[in-house]
């Protein structure tokens, strides 16, 4: 079989190659890795991201298990690589709305939301941000604090360019202000921008749309949103993060105090026939990590994890659990709490659970409860004019032959990797990302030889 | 008397080694300008073997000369005391020579005489000394004015008081069984290190300033060191210029700090630096301090004791102390 | 030629200009000898500034350029490229960070910030003066790969790379391909698995790009990314091949639990694998089956979880129950590990009536019986007492264990292994299938126990990593590597000991002197060896002692 | 004494120490950038030299800096286990430990030479650490310059 030359921009003899670009949907760690691998091979890649910066969920995490590596530290170089790569075109603030055509020759329609900023001019200096008078909940920090209407998604955002949130900008909603325009010396503000629809011709499409946490308020018994200091794991990540809204202090929302008794509840919505049947696969480990972090931060804090089965099968996971238990004194209690009540005196959450060793119903008052929700596939891939790729009963992209063709969707030339096709942790998602890249390269080579 | 027999034995063996071509060079001691002054000698043919002497004044660590001759001679014969064998262990570990290229003659030692101590005990006229023998606890100096007995403890080198030998080192020949001599008192340098440690930083600085004021940057300490084997010394480099050789305290402190640091985990405590120093600066103090710290912090054995192992700064333990953070 | 340094200070609008007195900095820097030009830009990174910069380089014959602006981490490549376009070697450029690390953090003390900025620029000039032109390190890549191990992950890598058009050498120690997966006779949930696997093996055999070496071992390996020379040994035959990349996919073994639960002594105690093979050969009708999980694993001597055993136990339990619905099947476990949607099969197994009970490691189950086990007794924590289950078959779920050969393989390829003797990847989170050494990749259970699905996914991932340099044909690295000045090298070997990449080694010299040399391909430019070198024979390009000392000197 | 006076800021009468900082490209240098991006206030009495890994900092640099009259030298590296080159910072830790003891023994306060772990996301930690360390040097006062 003949070797196919990829149209790598760097090598002159390939520049006229007929190979079309690849479109990757989702700019989280999975999409980033697929893009980098394909681009490194010499293929031209479009990386389409819904928000204003790539980075995805991993950017929101404080540390990662089981090495306790700082999440942003290991992610940020990859993000920068993406931005610098000659073979990668970043399309942020954009969404794929339609995929048509045939394998090897898709037409992909992308909606580019107006950023109201000329990204060629913006230097990311942030002068405009300080002048913007509007404050809105900061979704990156799980709405624990606020951001401005003109904002950087987070300090290490890539591209490091601001966007204007048209829903909240005073000028765009009420026709007055333009403070940012006055202060911007680079003259990058452009209120005349309109939504654009672009069509791209693509060789193949890779879905890497990731996950969203399940809405835990659906589990009424745990009282999220009603009982103070019952928070979600994602909120916890932002609280404990040194670059988060509290500067890494685990402050309770009710009184800004540091909790002394911390409890984690696993399988909130997962492995639950009323909600999501499947196991979300990462919660046992991240709860352990979060408990360790809390213990590292505060000597007097006690952390308890309520679990169903302790699923720690990955590399070095068991020893991580042992360390949490033995070195950090994290306690693990088997059992799924029936409900959370609120103490009338202290207002603290009270966990009601069955002690599996004695079969007694017990109640324990804690200062803060962290719910580890089911993780559900992001809805980004269920676009309306989707080219009939099948979705399974849980909303994951269906992989017809999970074992032998782990990235092939029901449609030739369209692949899926990462959490959008099955629950998995970061290393698995990174493996899948590279794997999907290999699969795409194989697809292109075999198709072009034919 | 035993000594004279050993000296003869050494001469005979060396003659044989040179004759049958086992070694092409033998490094030993010869008589210097006076009985108490012994200097290194380099014997290349059997006739030269007659020059070799062996007595309680033979104190140089001859391992320091290997490097100079290594490139031109295959199989160097060398006679070492147990303590000097530590330097050989290190030279092999630091890839300066292979053990096979050495022919090591182990010589017994009951403590070597520190000339400066002797001078204090005996007086300045050391040329009067013509011979030496020993008993269990004393050296018997044969002088023009008869025999004088001096307690060994009073005149041996400090380091001899806490003598150490490498473990499991295989000598090619042993002239006699190598025993670790025992003395009633220990090497005082440990105590001096502790005394120094107990001083405040300002006081330490003061002590060092007074030592350094004596230093003339002659670098004899460096030249005497077995571990000084780089083709070009960092101190001699012009680009970049680490060291300006101007006699300021700052420069002297830099010199001694870097020198001591380069010896971390390599210093076998032979004391040659201190012996060579014309200004009488107690250089072992700094080396001992570093040895003590590597032992305490990294659980590292003294240099030249084990034949295995890596220099303490060329390795790490994930659980190394981090109290200082 | 005289060194002519040009210094350009960026105002970044108000960001720098609002804090730092830029003209003051320029004035200071002009006083340094060899600085022939000092200018300011409103935005150095803007298109017009970049073209001005290029003009200045030509106009003034600049042969060193210093830009003082934001952070090199994002903007250095831009300016380096700009220099290159003006005909100046990219390594003659020096970046000074006066925005993030000066103006922005010292906005409260402007006078001091200005002084500091001037100092930082001085340091930059001090280093720039000593910069030397370099070329990126360039390696040609042989477009062929060697896959070691013919299990599912190795097969996947091999086929994928072959289909991308690369020549593949697949080396397998046994006399057949398929690995541990092919030892399983029954598959679930994909009952077609064995057929699909043999189809894969046939595809390998038919692929003209793939050469298969059965019953062969690797005897030797030398070289680096782009050109590894590997010696393959088949009996007394030896073959040498040169490949650009290597994938290690040697898999894992299955523990035989001798001495545990009467294995090897009681006739009806067997492992999951043995049961699997037996059930395919003969239709045994066991009526009372007890399975024990975590046998020889998650214990002190083998503390890890092997990840695959729970699912295999559930698979075999389902197979017992489906072939004989009357059979009583019981799984004793410590935690059931089925990830993701595999939860469905766990539920299905429970619906079939398979019993799941938890035992504790403090009181492991006991097997009672003479010659063969007839009862399994375990302590049930919930019930608070011992419970007996009668049985006619006991199946033990045993973990995957590291291959004996891993240690010698690790030495051969100079890659690390972990304390559990599995191979250790470059970074557990983000570089799971790579080694720190370029050009060698790892996949499947050789890295850590994984199921067939994950093995295949990793096989693909390793193939992607191997394909990258091979597609490029040529790889470039920033030349900030270390190198040794032979005439100063004392040959002490400290650098060899500290190098995390095995990039330093003794050089074969004719004269009788030991000196080291640095493999420019393997070196990643950390500079660890430079610090270990006592006399400065070892130096790092772009971070030499001379350059760094000159920076310190400019500050002093 | 003359030098000492020179380095006292007339305006604030506060001693401005001369401090050299080595920062690892992958973590603490990025953290310093982040501190900037977050507009954190940091005293200005230090200069950063970027190195690829804290292990590139040869102890001789530190000794040299002290001989050239610096009041403090700090090395900032990745947290243990997070080294970009997998193990460089472990070597640094050993070297620093030993050198601190040696400096102290030779009459240079070991507090003048510090090692800290700061990861790329710890902009605030960078700022806080620098503040504290510089404060520490201020408390020690100017080093008696050897002449």
Image: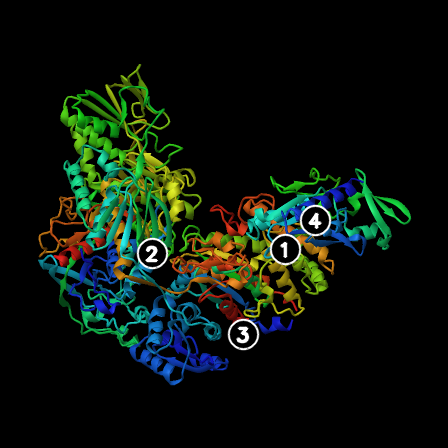
Q: Nearer the viewer, residue C520 or D123?
A: C520
The reply to whether callout 1 and callout 2 are in contact (CB within 8 Å) is no
Along the polypeptide, which appears first: circle 1 or circle 3? 3
Disc marking residue B189: 4
Which quadrant of the view contains residue D67?
bottom right
Is residue A248 visible in this depiction of the protein? yes
Q: CA distance from mark 1 to mark 3?
A: 36 Å
State which mark lies toward you, 1 or 3. 1
Q: Find residue C253 and report its horizontal and vertical position in percent.
A: 31, 35
The residue at which mark 1 appears reads as D105
Is residue A35 found left or right of B7 in the rendered image? left
**Label 1 CA crowd tier, 10 Å (few <14, some 14–19, many 20+):** many
What percent of the width, then of the height, locates residue C378? 31, 22
Residue C36 in the image, given as x and y percentages of width and height: 45, 83
In the structure shown, which secondary structural element does the residue marked by tag 3 occupy? Answer: loop
State the separation of the CA atoms marked 3 and 2: 64 Å
What chain is tagged by disc 2? Answer: C
| Distance between the alpha carbons at the discs numbered 4 and 3 | 50 Å
Mark 2 Cα-neighbour bin, 10 Å: few <14, some 14–19, many ≥20: many
Q: Quick one: which residue is furthest to the right in this view?
A: B145
- What residue does disc 2 label? C227
């Amino acid at each position: 079989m003949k070797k196919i030359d990829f149209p790598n921009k760097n090598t002159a003899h390939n520049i006229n190659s007929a190979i079309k670009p690849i479109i990757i949907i989702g700019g989280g760690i999975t999409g980033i890795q697929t893009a980098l691998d394909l681009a490194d091979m010499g293929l031209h890649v479009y990386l389409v991201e819904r928000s204003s910066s790539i980075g995805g969920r991993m950017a929101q995490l404080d540390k990662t298990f089981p090495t306790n590596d700082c999440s942003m530290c290991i992610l940020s170089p990859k993000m920068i690589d993406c931005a610098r790569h000659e073979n990668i075109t970043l399309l942020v603030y954009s969404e794929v709305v339609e995929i048509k055509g045939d394998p090897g020759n898709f037409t992909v329609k992308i909606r580019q939301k107006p950023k109201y900023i000329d990204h060629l001019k913006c230097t990311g200096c942030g002068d405009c941000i300080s002048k913007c008078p509007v404050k809105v909940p900061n979704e990156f920090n799980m709405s624990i604090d606020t951001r401005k209407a003109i904002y950087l998604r987070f300090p290490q955002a890539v591209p490091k360019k601001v966007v204007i949130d048209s829903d909240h900008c005073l000028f765009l909603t009420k026709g007055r202000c333009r403070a940012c325009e006055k202060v911007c010396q680079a003259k990058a503000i452009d209120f005349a921008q309109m939504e654009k629809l672009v069509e791209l011709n693509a060789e193949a499409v890779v879905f890497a749309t990731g996950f969203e946490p399940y809405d835990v308020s659906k589990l009424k018994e745990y009282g999220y949103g009603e009982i103070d200091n019952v928070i979600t794991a994602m909120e916890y990540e932002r609280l404990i993060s040194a670059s988060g809204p509290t500067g890494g202090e685990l402050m309770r929302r009710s009184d800004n105090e540091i909790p002394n008794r911390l409890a984690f509840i696993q399988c909130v919505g997962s492995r639950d026939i009323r909600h999501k049947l499947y196991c979300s696969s990462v919660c046992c480990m991240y709860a352990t990590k979060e408990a360790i972090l809390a213990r590292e931060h505060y000597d007097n804090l006690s952390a308890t994890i309520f679990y169903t089965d302790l699923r720690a099968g990955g590399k070095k996971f068991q020893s991580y659990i042992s360390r949490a238990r033995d070195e950090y004194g994290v306690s693990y209690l088997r059992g799924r709490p029936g409900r959370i009540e609120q103490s009338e005196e202290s207002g603290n959450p009270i966990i009601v659970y069955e002690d599996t060793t004695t079969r007694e119903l017990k109640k324990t008052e804690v200062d803060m409860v962290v719910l580890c929700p089911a993780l559900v596939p992001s809805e980004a891939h269920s676009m309306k004019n989707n080219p009939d790729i099948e979705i399974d009963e849980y909303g994951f992209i269906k992989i017809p032959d999970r074992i032998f063709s782990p990235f092939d969707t029901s449609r030739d030339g369209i692949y899926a990797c990462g959490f959008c096709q099955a629950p998995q942790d970061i290393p698995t998602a990174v493996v899948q990302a590279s794997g999907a890249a290999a699969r795409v390269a194989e697809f292109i080579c075999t198709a072009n030889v034919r | 008397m035993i000594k004279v027999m050993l000296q003869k034995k050494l001469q005979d063996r060396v003659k044989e080694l040179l004759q049958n071509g086992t070694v092409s060079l033998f490094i030993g001691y010869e008589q210097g300008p006076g009985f108490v002054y012994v200097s290194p000698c380099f014997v290349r043919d059997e006739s030269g073997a007659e020059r070799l002497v062996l007595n309680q004044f033979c104190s140089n660590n001859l391992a320091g000369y290997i490097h100079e001759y290594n490139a031109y001679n295959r199989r160097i014969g060398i006679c070492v005391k147990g303590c000097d064998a530590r330097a050989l262990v290190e030279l092999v570990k630091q890839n300066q020579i292979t053990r096979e290229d050495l022919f090591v003659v182990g010589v017994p030692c009951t403590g070597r005489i520190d000339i400066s101590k002797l001078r204090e005990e005996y007086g300045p006229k050391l040329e009067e000394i013509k011979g030496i023998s020993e008993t269990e606890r004393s050296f018997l100096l044969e002088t023009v004015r008869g025999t004088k007995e001096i307690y060994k403890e009073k005149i041996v080198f400090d380091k001899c008081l806490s003598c150490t030998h490498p473990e499991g080192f295989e000598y090619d020949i042993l002239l006699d069984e190598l025993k670790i001599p025992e003395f009633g008192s220990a090497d005082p340098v440990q105590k001096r290190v502790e005394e120094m440690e107990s001083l405040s930083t300002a006081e330490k600085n003061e002590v060092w300033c007074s030592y350094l004021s004596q230093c003339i940057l002659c670098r004899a300490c460096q030249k005497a060191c077995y571990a000084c084997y780089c083709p070009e010394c960092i101190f001699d480099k012009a680009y970049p210029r680490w060291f300006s050789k101007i006699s300021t305290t700052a420069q002297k402190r830099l010199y001694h700090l870097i020198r001591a640091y380069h010896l971390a985990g390599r210093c076998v405590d032979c004391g040659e630096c201190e012996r060579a120093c014309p200004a009488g600066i107690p250089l072992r103090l700094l080396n001992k301090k570093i040895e003590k710290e590597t032992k305490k912090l990294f659980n590292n054995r003294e240099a030249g004791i084990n034949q295995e192992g890596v220099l303490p700064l060329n390795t790490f333990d994930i659980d190394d102390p981090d109290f200082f953070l | 030629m005289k060194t002519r340094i040009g210094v350009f200070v960026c105002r970044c609008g108000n960001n720098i200009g609002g804090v730092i007195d830029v003209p003051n900095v320029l004035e200071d820097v002009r006083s340094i000898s060899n600085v022939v030009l000092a200018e300011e830009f409103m935005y150095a990174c803007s298109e017009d500034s970049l073209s001005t910069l290029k003009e200045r380089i030509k106009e003034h014959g600049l042969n060193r350029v210093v830009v003082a602006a934001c952070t090199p981490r994002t903007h250095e490549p831009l300016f380096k490229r700009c220099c290159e376009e003006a005909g100046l070697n990219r390594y003659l450029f020096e970046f000074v960070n006066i925005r993030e690390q000066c103006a922005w953090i010292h906005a409260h003390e402007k006078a001091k910030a200005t002084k500091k900025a001037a100092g930082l620029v001085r340091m930059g000039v001090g280093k720039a003066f000593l910069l030397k032109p370099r070329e990126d390190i360039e390696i040609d890549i042989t477009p062929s790969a060697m896959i070691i191990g013919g299990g599912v992950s190795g097969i996947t890598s091999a086929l994928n790379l072959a289909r991308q058009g690369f020549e593949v050498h697949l080396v397998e120690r046994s006399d057949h391909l398929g690995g541990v997966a092919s030892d399983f006779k029954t598959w679930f949930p994909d009952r077609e698995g064995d057929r699909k696997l043999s189809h894969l093996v046939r595809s390998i055999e038919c692929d003209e790009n793939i050469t298969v070496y059965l019953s062969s071992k690797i005897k030797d390996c030398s070289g680096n990314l782009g050109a590894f020379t590997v010696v393959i040994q088949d009996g007394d035959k030896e073959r040498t091949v040169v490949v650009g990349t290597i994938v290690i996919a040697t898999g894992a073994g299955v523990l035989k639990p001798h001495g545990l639960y009467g294995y090897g002594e009681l006739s009806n105690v067997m492992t999951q694998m043995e049961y699997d093979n037996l059930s395919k050969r003969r239709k045994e009708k066991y009526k009372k089956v007890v399975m024990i999980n975590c046998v020889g694993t998650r214990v002190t001597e083998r503390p890890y979880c092997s990840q695959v055993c729970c699912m295999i136990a559930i698979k075999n339990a389902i197979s017992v129950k489906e072939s004989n619905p009357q059979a009583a099947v019981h799984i004793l476990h410590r935690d059931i590990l089925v990830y993701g949607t595999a939860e469905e099969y766990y539920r299905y197994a429970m619906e079939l009536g398979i019993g799941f009970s938890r035992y504790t490691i403090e009181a492991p189950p006991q097997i009672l019986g003479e010659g063969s086990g007839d009862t399994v007794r375990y302590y049930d924590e919930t019930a608070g007492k011992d419970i007996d289950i009668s049985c006619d078959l006991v199946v033990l779920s045993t973990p995957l264990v590291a291959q004996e050969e891993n240690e010698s393989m690790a030495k051969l390829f100079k890659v690390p292994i972990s304390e559990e003797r599995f191979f250790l990847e470059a970074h557990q989170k983000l570089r799971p299938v790579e080694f720190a050494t370029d050009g060698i990749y790892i996949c499947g259970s050789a890295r850590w126990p994984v199921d067939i699905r994950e093995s295949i996914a990793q096989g693909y991932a390793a193939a992607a990593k191997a394909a990258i340099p091979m597609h490029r044909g040529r790889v470039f690295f920033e030349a900030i590597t270390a190198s040794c000045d032979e005439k100063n090298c004392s040959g002490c070997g400290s650098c060899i000991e500290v190098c995390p990449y095995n990039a330093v080694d003794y050089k074969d010299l004719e004269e009788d002197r030991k000196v080291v040399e640095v493999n420019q391909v393997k070196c990643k430019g950390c500079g660890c060896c430079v610090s270990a070198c006592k006399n400065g024979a070892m130096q790092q390009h772009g971070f030499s002692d001379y350059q760094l000392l000159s920076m310190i000197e400019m500050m002093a | 004494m003359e030098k000492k006076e020179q380095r006292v800021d007339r305006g604030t009468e506060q001693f401005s120490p001369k401090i050299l900082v080595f920062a690892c490209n992958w973590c603490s240098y990025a953290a310093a950038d982040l501190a900037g991006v977050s507009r954190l206030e940091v005293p200005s009495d230090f200069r950063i030299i970027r190195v690829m890994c804290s292990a590139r900092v040869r102890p001789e640099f530190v000794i040299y800096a002290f001989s050239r009259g610096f009041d403090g030298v700090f090395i900032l590296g990745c947290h243990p286990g997070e080294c970009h080159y997998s193990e460089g910072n472990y070597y640094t830790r050993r070297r620093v430990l030993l050198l601190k003891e040696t400096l102290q023994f030779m009459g240079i306060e070991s507090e003048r030479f510090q090692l800290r772990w700061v990861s790329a996301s710890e902009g605030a930690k960078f700022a806080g650490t620098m503040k504290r360390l510089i404060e520490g040097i201020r408390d020690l006062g100017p080093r008696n310059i050897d002449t």
